[in-house]
Amino acid sequence: MDTARAPGSEPGEAAEAPVFAALGPKVRSAARWSLVNTVVLRLGNFATGIVLARFALGPAEWGVYGLAQTVLLVLLSANELGVGLALVRWEGDPRRFAPTVLTLSTLSSGLLYGALFAAAPAVGGLLGTADATEVLRVMCLCVVIDGVAQVPGGILTREFAQGRRMLIDGLNFVTGTAVTLLLAFAGWGAMSFACGAVVGNLVSLIGCALAAPGALRFGWDAGQARALLRFGLPLAGASMLALAVVNVDTMVLGAALGNVALGFYVLAFNISGWPVRIISEAARRVSFAGFSRLAGSPRALAEGFARALGVLITGTVPLCVLLAGLAEPVVRLVYGSQWTPAAAALPWLMALGLIRIGGELAYDCLVAAGQRRSLFLVQGLWLVALIPVLLAAARLNGIVGVAQGHVLVAGGLVVPVFLVALRRGGIGLGPVGRACAWPFLGGAVMTVLVLGLRGPFGDGPLGLVAVGAVALAGYAVCVLPGRDFLRGTRRAGRPAAPVPPARQDVR
């Protein structure tokens, strides 16, 4: 059974160039809206973080928040058992099976929250943050809200309705941030983050329900439920592993070094996530839907992946290089001298951020191509290799050691394995290499310029601006030869030999 199709729907015909051409305008429009949305929200979050770090919260509160956020993200990865992705991936009218999706996701998210509520004291104590119990219980209410929002949100993603999503996310940010700031300055500490997150997610649920009318309708079809679970459970498992990979460092640090060190690390990790969130998050709102429409044509999928990777890497490399090369003065200038210890881990975390961007895009492509078993194995290998490395690194070199351990495992082990998995999906090394070549060359030139000019220009605001401007100019010159490929007027090269359209592995 090919579960890329809604139960009872008719098989669709794979089309190569016509499908690629027809999707182009939709994807470009959605990508523009998504990028604007993400940039605006991340700038807002950045400004909010500065205010809170300078005037309201200290490293210990950030440590508690980081722990609660980690637990929330892991739960969110599995709260709807992966069935929500069927709304984007399956053919046919999604409203036919949406009621079953809503029932499954609401039940599973409610059960997860109940388990977390009971286990919250043990979780906090195990990770060295016993006072996080109530913060965990409040913040993880977002799991239930997200479970209910899966259907209207998935329909909006399937329709590339990123303009409506921008409005919804804006309302989420304004209300959630207002609550967080009011409570933080009233002395609520880490609980202010939890309450703000719950209020913002409730606003998002209401907005999605209004933007996709009729989506919040419960129902049940046993055949659909079985097909949905066969499709979704492997994805939920892979998603949990992916988030565990990104967040296991928080658990290790909390248990090994305590809240204060964890607070410094969380701040550094959040800074390293700026490029990931601004660029990769914007792309992922349209990449899975786009790759899913191209999955029937290996050649079109390979071309689409190579071009998307080239655009992402080109936009991300300069941000990563600047934040890595200017870590200490940037942290001191933006957050204050009390947060300077966070800067030591930042260069390594920026390298990890660049790897994460490529890995997340590959994740979406492998899901769309039906390579779910390969994806699960990659994420499982990553986590198994990472845990012992981080445990040893935390004791040897604190937060810097944890960051270095992340890069060692990701660059030395996971990237090659991801490339093998992509090759199995019909995407060879040639297109990937050509998509990354010019940005990596530009990054190397930027690194030399930043390190060479920082001394003469100094670490003051004007000096940082001057160094950044010269480095960016050097980068722009290096990536100019690849501009035709990024615009889609020249292919990245022939992909690997075409393979038959991938079927979803339901064994």
Image (spheres, rainbow, N blue to C red):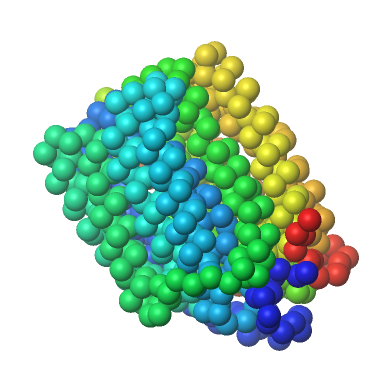
Q: Residue at x 41, y 45 (%)?
A: 113
Q: Position of residue 30 (x, y in %)?
A: 48, 74
**Residue 504 drawn above or below residue 466:** below
Please name the residue shown 62% across and 47% down the image.
237
Left or right: residue 392 versus residue 418 is left
Q: Nearer the viewer, residue 402 or 364?
A: 364
Q: Residue 263 falls in which quadrant of the image?
A: top left
Residue 334 in the image: above or below residue 93: above
Relative side of 195 to 448, left or right: left
Image quarter for residue 41? bottom left
Asked if residue 67 can be seen in this view, the reply is no
At x 68% / y 39%, what residue is drawn? 380
Residue 346 point in image, percent of width and height: 46, 33
Q: Is residue 25 visible?
A: yes
In percent of width and height, residue 269 lies at 44, 37
Task: Give the residue at the far top of this rendering.
Answer: 396
